[in-house]
Amino acid sequence: MPKVKLPRKSTSIDMTAMCDVSFLLLTFFMLTSKFRPPEAVPIDLPNSRSQIKLENIMTISVDRDGKAYFSLNETVARGELLENILKVNPEIKLTNNQKKAFRGLDMFGFSLAEMPGVLNLNPEQYKNYKQNGIPMDSVNNELYEWVLQARYVDPSMKIALKGDKDSDIKAIKKVITTLTERVHVNKFNLITTLSGNSQKQVTEVEADKK
């Protein structure tokens, strides 16, 4: 008895639903992704071999010209920090739009006197604005004020120092002196890149206590 041959049928899969899901996911990620704003100044980090997690931290950056910049990674903390600064510097008057602009700054390096004018700049103007760094000399140490008021916002907040590998060591020493002698913080963190890796890493260090 001959075998019965079943007709072969090609398998057809409707990919319409899969395409719809793919485009929906793509649209979702495009609308919800928040790109990191460009830093006020590019800093070429030195290498390190140890690391800790980077979170809840204020960062003091020093570029190769020795200028100091300040940043907080929490938007809410930035708003509270600004209010503290305005309380101890009542001569500085800011509008609500200027305060909103400050909360959006990822990093800044200008003096308190410059702040009202800088916060009036639009994003493109701010990007091209040449920042002269936060004053940190013995006569006018505004960096001390920013660090102190940030610690009032959150005493558990960690402090990180981010220096260009070609930074003037004297500028780094000024920052460390501000932390140890003015704010009385002897334990802070150094932001570097891990050897053989482009990602930023944080190493905890402790300054010599006098």
Image (cartoon, grey):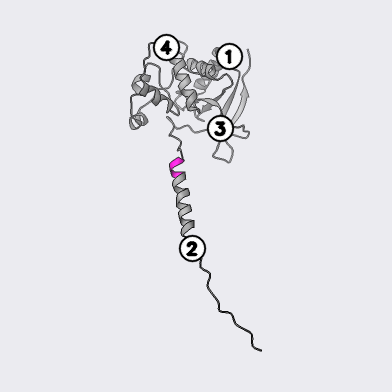
Q: Position of residue 20 (x, y in %)?
A: 45, 54
Instruction: Pick out the residue farthest to the right.
Output: 1
Location of residue 155 (image quadrant): top right
> Circle 3 sits in a helix, a strand or a loop, which is it?
strand
> Circle 1 sits in a helix, a strand or a loop, which is it?
loop
Location of residue 159 (image quadrant): top right
Report if the CB atoms under discs 1 and 2 are less than 8 Å apart. Answer: no
Q: Quadrant of the N terminus?
A: bottom right
Q: Nearer the viewer, mark 3 or mark 4?
A: 4
- Kindly identify which residue carries mark 3: 192
Q: Give amino acid for label 1.
A: His
Please rate how many residues cluster around mark 2, counting C-alpha atoms within 10 Å: few if below 14, some from 14 to 19, many from 20.
few
- Kindly identify which residue carries mark 1: 184
- CA separation, marks 2 and 3? 51 Å
Give the residues in magenta: 29-33
Q: Give amino acid for label 2.
A: Asp
